[in-house]
Amino acid sequence: MSKRRILVTSALPYANGPIHLGHLVEYIQTDIWVRFQRLRGNHCVYVCADDTHGTAIMLRARRESRSEEQVIAQSQQEHERDFSHFQISFDNYGSTHSSENRQLCGEIWSAIREAGLVKTKDVEQLFDVQQKTFLADRFVRGTCPTCGSPDQPGDNCSQCGTTYTPAELIDPISTLSGSTPEIRTAEHLFIELEQLHGFLEQWTQNEDHLQPEVANYLKGHFLGSGDSPEGAKILRDWDISRPAPYFGFEIPDSPGHFWYVWFDAPIGYIASTQQWCDKNGECLDDWWRSEECEIHHFLGKDITYFHTLFWPGMLKTAGFQLPTKVHIHGFLTVNGEKMSKSKGTFIKAETFHRHLDPSALRYFYASKLGPKLDDIDLSLEEFVMKVNSDLVNKVVNLASRSAKFVRDVGLASVYPDDGGLFDKAAAAGEEIAEAYESCDYNRAMRLIMALADEANPYVEQAEPWNLKKDPARAGQLQDVCTVAINLFRQLVIYLSPVLPDLAKKTETLLGEPITDWEQSKTPQLGTPVAKFKHMMKRIDQKDIDKMVDDTQKEQAEELAATLSESTAKFQDGGEALAAEPMTEECTIDDFVKVDLRVARVVEADHVDGARKLLKLKLSLGGDETRTVFAGIKAAYEPEKLVGRLVVMVANLKPRQMKFGLSEGMVCASGAGGAEVFLLSPDEGAVPGQRVH
């Protein structure tokens, strides 16, 4: 069988936040498929990159007094660290802010221009007056103009699938400031996607490039058909530019206009491939302009529209190879609900890695992922039971109960009679491979565990621990252990795309690397076995609880830091107020509702496990005290705060945090972190006095 040349991508993570367990569904799904293809002997290259452009990066850099380049460099370092912890095997991990991406954007843009697909028109766009910026789609929420669903993003409705502009939303709100944006007119560049309607309909509806439900979705919502009651739908023009200020690549033939992030982000797939080619002496055209190369995209269902209409249209126009398959997956829920910070289920990859074995998550996701768009649920209780039952009790147990007994004599030179177990497992290899190929990992895991269920009774009935006691039965012991070790090795070969760490430990135990799927058909014989070392730890509920606790603490710190930043907006004058407008104008009647009081710090302590918080006990005079958690740890030593007068917001509704009940806020100015300055009245002010 000829070996395939395959290029694989995952969607690019945005460089404005950490990798969390929801993100990891996609990267683990992709990595499993890539490792399987390599094990089958195919030349499979996996590329990805950080998605780095847009208003969010610009605003974060401004808020943190850093350059955009500094922000995205830190983000990329953190993302690559998290991916490596979960054994994600990128061949190249780049950035959309690379010189390669800039050059390719220009090349593809020129082809689109030459094809006559670009037009210019004025656009009424939402503008945040307080932040002084036009609002990208992601910074607007409102009511869908088609179905009336509330709290929808600024580009398409998650309920009915309709696409629209942010200005078309009903009652739009800026997520940057919480204010109602105003409509301003600016010139934008558009790609007339309707000119590619025939091509896109043919590509999406034929040759299995998409899952059937995705093809049907595109047909019903965007493409239509001539024989449908309403006739063929008209594809909307694609707004491809944004006016300054904007962090991105300025369009060379249109000064003052920048390519919208959804234009340059997918081109980042090609740019990352270019970087890999340059490092490995390969030619880009062999991967992106060759019918002999398969291109496979893995992504979430929320970005289906961009990857199945815009992206193929761009590639076709610019003469690049079209995707062979776009593999789309569903979302992650935790304990049956959307991930929640307050419940400790919005779990970052870094937090999971601190407490639990990433291999366990890889297996659990594999046991849930199928070839369709169904959401998958991470039930933490089921997670514990499944990993312990399948991996520890069934798979690793085969090795742990036999390897230590055969170490002194090695494996038998002739494979013993096992009642057909090895041959049956070898014959199952192609069905398991078919399941991997079709991304039906759930079925693959069931098939593998069925083999484990047949292998374990063999060991239990043979009782090698009893055979070890009788020197006269040493030959029988070697035979039993040879069978057990080889059945274990078969399982590990089949599981190695999911559990590369277990595969490495097995290689160390048996002295032979796992490099080929066909190794499952031939037993390993006549070789010594190394001393057995622990391969996988049982998951303890206490570890889950600690991870959830840490997640809640992280959320509490983020909340406290946000509250600390917000206090700067209460005071008259000062850096923060001058640099950042108030969220909303208020009347005198509104202002007097805020009860600002003088308070004295009577106790100040560090908070165990918190990186940003101090716990303050504040006296408001007499016997009245309040406990406040403040995100000022980087700026103040607690012992130096005792006795100091501060200003507090005394009539906030108490908030239950992980560390305790917070009963107010202290007022401060500054940029945050170490640059925080508590507001203090002059000595002579009395705790409990109202601040006017």
Image (tube, helix red, strand yellow):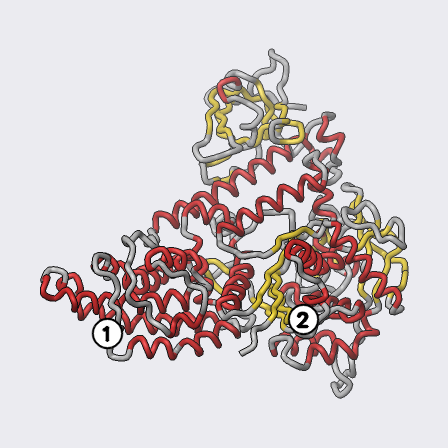
Residue 243 image point, x, y percent: 84, 50
Q: Closer to the N terminus: mark 1 or mark 2?
A: 2
Mark 2 surroundings: few (<14), some (14-19) or many (≥20) residues within 10 A = many
Say left or right for 301 vs 427. right
Query: Which circle, 1 or 2, is nearer the viewer?
Result: 1
C-alpha distance separating marks 1 and 2: 48 Å
| Secondary-structure class at tag 2 | loop
In this rendering, is residue 153 above or below 311?
Answer: above
Give amino acid for label 2.
Answer: Pro
Residue 36 image point, x, y percent: 49, 67
In this rendering, is residue 188 above or below 524?
Answer: above
Residue lying furthest bottom in this view?
A: 227
Residue marked by disc 2: 323
Q: Is residue 335 visible?
A: no
Residue marked by disc 1: 416
In this rendering, is residue 675 above or below 446?
Answer: above
Say left or right for 297 vs 256. left
Q: Is 530 in front, or is 461?
A: 530
Q: Is 239 in front, or is 247?
A: 247
Q: Is 332 in front, or is 293?
A: 293
Say left or right for 276 vs 503. right
Give amino acid for label 1.
Answer: Pro
In this rendering, is residue 193 above or below 641?
Answer: below
Q: Residue at x 82, y 73 (%)?
A: 194
* Residues at circles 1 and 2 in contact by the CB criterion of under 8 Å: no
Residue 502 image point, x, y percent: 39, 58
| Secondary-structure class at tag 1 | loop
Q: Residue at x 79, y 47 (%)?
A: 246
Q: Give residue 165's mark.
A: none
Residue 690 falls in image quadrant:
top right
Mark 1 surroundings: few (<14), some (14-19) or many (≥20) residues within 10 A = some
